[in-house]
Structure formats: structure tokens, C-alpha cells
Image (cartoon, rainbow, N blue to C red):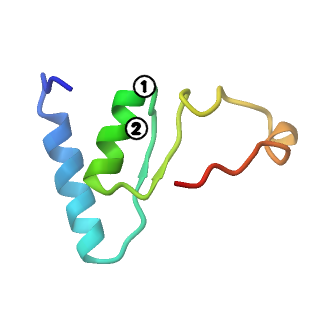
């Protein structure tokens, strides 16, 4: 993925700090497979975004399948 604004360097730094402190990281706004794979490679532990599901009312969340790595 081409880095245009330095944001992936920030993501990498935050994930690295969290991993060293055993803190769960959640990436929000994951929209592409490329983003998913990069976040996995960086060690991000949780992700959410349109790639997984569009926003839903709370009443529709429980029936969703749990996606595990």
C-alpha cells in the first residue's frame, strides 16, 4: 500500500507500543482486503469497518457471525 500521508507509520508505532504493553488494538474503518492484510502484518488484534459489515442497528448485531483470525 502506498503511504501518502505517513498514517501507516503512525499505525505501526501505535500497534508496536500496544503489543509491548499487552494492550488490545482495534483498527476502525477497515474498508479493503489490502488494509486488512497490512493491519494483520503489523499485529493489530481487532478490526472493524465496512469490509466486515455496514453499520447495523443493535437488534441486528447478535445474529452476525463472529469472525476470528
Q: CA distance from mark 1 to mark 2?
A: 6 Å
With 27 as the anchor, is 57 left or right in this view? right
Q: Residues within 10 Å of mark 2 (few under 14, many from 20)?
A: some
Label of residue 54 in the image? none
Q: Residue at x 23, y 56 (%)?
A: 14
With 61 as the anchor, is 14 left or right in this view? left
Q: Residue furthest bottom?
A: 21
Residue 61 in the image: state x and y as whole percent: 79, 42
Between residues 6 and 63, which one lies in front from this camera angle? 63
* CB within 8 Å, label 1 to label 2: yes
Residue at disc 1, secondary structure: loop
Q: Is residue 68 above or below residue 19?
A: above
With 49 as the anchor, is 35 left or right in this view? left
Q: Quadrant of the N terminus?
A: top left
Residue at disc 2, secondary structure: helix
The residue indicated by pointer 2 is 36
The residue indicated by pointer 1 is 32
Q: Residue at x 59, y 55 (%)?
A: 68
Residue 5 in the image: state x and y as whole percent: 13, 26
Amino acid at each position: 500500500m502506498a503511504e501518502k500521508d505517513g498514517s501507516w507509520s503512525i499505525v505501526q508505532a501505535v500497534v508496536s507500543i500496544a503489543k509491548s504493553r499487552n494492550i488490545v488494538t482495534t483498527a476502525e474503518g477497515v474498508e479493503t482486503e489490502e488494509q486488512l492484510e497490512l493491519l494483520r502484518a503489523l499485529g493489530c488484534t481487532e478490526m472493524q469497518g465496512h469490509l466486515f459489515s455496514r453499520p447495523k442497528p443493535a437488534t441486528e448485531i447478535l445474529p452476525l457471525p463472529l469472525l476470528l483470525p
